[in-house]
Image (cartoon, grey):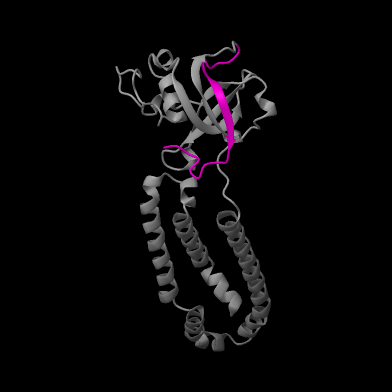
Amino acid sequence: MLERLLSRWRGVALTLFTVVATVWLSMTGGLSLYIHPRYFVFTSIMAVIGGVLAIAAIAVTPGREDHDHGHDHDHSHESDALGTSTTRRSNRRPRLGARQRIAVIASTTVTLVVVATAFVALIIAPPVTLSSAAVENRSLNANAQTVDSPISEGETLRGRDTSSFTVKDWAAMLRQGDGEQQVLGERAKLVGFVTEDPDSPDAFILARFVVNCCAIDAAPVGVAVHQPGWQGSYPVDSWVEVDGAFVTNPSASSAERVALMPTTITAIDQPNDPYVY
């Protein structure tokens, strides 16, 4: 009986777990590691609706025993007429039942493993954010030109308060119009994670991921930081805060023509919200 119930409701159980995990992540703030904040309310509402529908499915779905009873009743007279043929068929039922039980047990085991794995990954294990490995698989600053610039076309940075600018804003400036010339000499205090500059050993890229919808479509953006010997102090994927000024990149081998010349580099913990939007 238990195996039959588990087999019948494994889909409902997976749905309910997904609902609980989504609501839990929403309440604890972990949902920001997966989707853009503007979708939080929509996702939470849809999760609750999914939970209600899953519970309704449990309440209204007929039992298997009722179906089996009706099926046997409809064919009782036919079985009597067939005589010995029915006897041979009934002799095969235990063997078929054993196969069904094995299939149910196997299916139930797989379901429990999937649920347990998802539970550990989503609830117990600390969430893992996108890192330099993802940067290598996605072109750095490929979408920087499509990111909204912090200033309108024709405006300049002169006299502008840039203290709120993020890595995304500076990366967008550097790739729009005469942005490079405007950025030179400007000071910035930026937070990001360390990833290698593939063209220059004397610089690293201070990177962040821009999320437009969810983590799947996250695009890496970054600015070069000129710091020879950085490898010994700042491991790849570590988070740092860099305070400095933008200059013409001293490294001729780097593809980044403008780099942040740091005054200070401070190792920090990963921010609660590691993505930018």
In magenta stretch: residue 271: yes
The one of 89 and 200 positioned closer to us in this rendering:
200
Left or right: 172, with 244 as reference point: left
Left or right: 160, with 188 as reference point: left
Left or right: 227, with 37 as reference point: right
Q: Is residue 206 above or below residue 80?
A: above
Q: Is residue 194 above or below residue 10?
A: above
For the C terminus, give its image quadrant: top left
Q: Is residue 81 above or below residue 220?
A: below
- Residue lying at 49% horizontally and 86% vertically, measured from the top left: 73
Left or right: 21, with 56 as reference point: right
The picture quadrant where one finds residue 138 is top right
Range covered by the magenta-colored residues: 253-277
**Horizontal and vertical percent position of residue 157:** 35, 19
For the N terminus, give its image quadrant: bottom right
**Horizontal and vertical percent position of residue 104:** 62, 70
The one of 155 and 58 positioned closer to us in this rendering:
155
In magenta stretch: residue 194: no
The picture quadrant where one finds residue 45 is bottom left
The picture quadrant where one finds residue 125 is bottom right
**Horizontal and vertical percent position of residue 118:** 58, 57
Farthest residue to the top: give it.
Answer: 252
Q: Is residue 182 above or below residue 22?
A: above
- Residue lying at 35% horizontally and 17% vertically, measured from the top left: 158
- Residue lying at 57% horizontally and 85% vertically, measured from the top left: 82
**Horizontal and vertical percent position of residue 193:** 56, 33
